[in-house]
Image: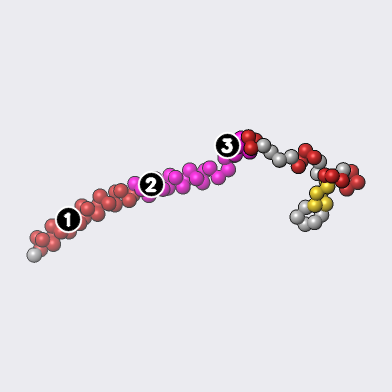
Amino acid sequence: MLAECHPAVVVFGADGAPCAWTATDQRTPSVKTLVKRFAKDESGSTAIEYGLIASGIAVAILAVLQGLRTKLTNTFANVSANLN
């Protein structure tokens, strides 16, 4: 396998075994290519969307509970005043 490659493109992998790569495999992608690839990548977006929905629901619940807290405080204060 190594006899087929040019010595300038022989790369050793993480396990120390030689890998025969061509020069085109070693090109570094441009920033423009990386940005395009990032924009197209939709993996993980569903989890983020569900997280945003859950946080929105939590904020709505907290707002409702704040309103109930005020009403319940007033109700129990009235009951306490009437019992005395």
Residue 79 position, x and y percent, is: 13, 59
Q: Secondary structure at mark 3?
A: helix
Measuring 88% from the left and 48% from the top, which residue is drawn there?
A: 2
Query: For the residue carrying disc 1, how many other residues have a C-alpha within 10 Å: few (<14), some (14-19), or many (20+)?
Result: few
Q: Amino acid at mark 2?
A: Ile
> Which residue, given by chain and number where applicable, does mark 1 sit on?
75
Quadrant of residue 6 within the rendered picture = top right
* Distance in Å between CA atoms under marks 3 and 2: 28 Å
Q: Amino acid at mark 1?
A: Thr
> Which residue, given by chain and number where applicable, does mark 3 sit on?
39
Q: Secondary structure at mark 1?
A: helix
Q: Amino acid at mark 3?
A: Ala
Closer-to-camera residue (38/70)? 38
- Is any atom of residue 62 visible in this view? yes
Q: Nearer the viewer, mark 3 or mark 1?
A: 3
Q: Is residue 58 magenta?
A: yes
Q: Are marks 3 and 2 in contact (CB under 8 Å)?
A: no
Q: Secondary structure at mark 2?
A: helix
Specify which label sits upstream in the sequence, 2 or 1: 2
Q: Nearer the viewer, mark 3 or mark 2?
A: 3
Q: Is residue 37 magenta?
A: yes
> Which residue, given by chain and number where applicable, does mark 2 sit on?
57
Q: Main secondary structure of the magenta part?
A: helix
Measuring 41% from the left and 48% from the top, which residue is drawn there?
A: 55
Specify which label sits upstream in the sequence, 3 or 1: 3
Query: For the residue carrying disc 2, how many other residues have a C-alpha within 10 Å: few (<14), some (14-19), or many (20+)?
Result: few
* Distance in Å between CA atoms under marks 3 and 1: 54 Å
In the drawing, does residue 32 fall left or right of residue 75? right
Residue 16 position, x and y percent, is: 80, 56
Is residue 48 placed above or below 79 in the rendered structure?
Answer: above
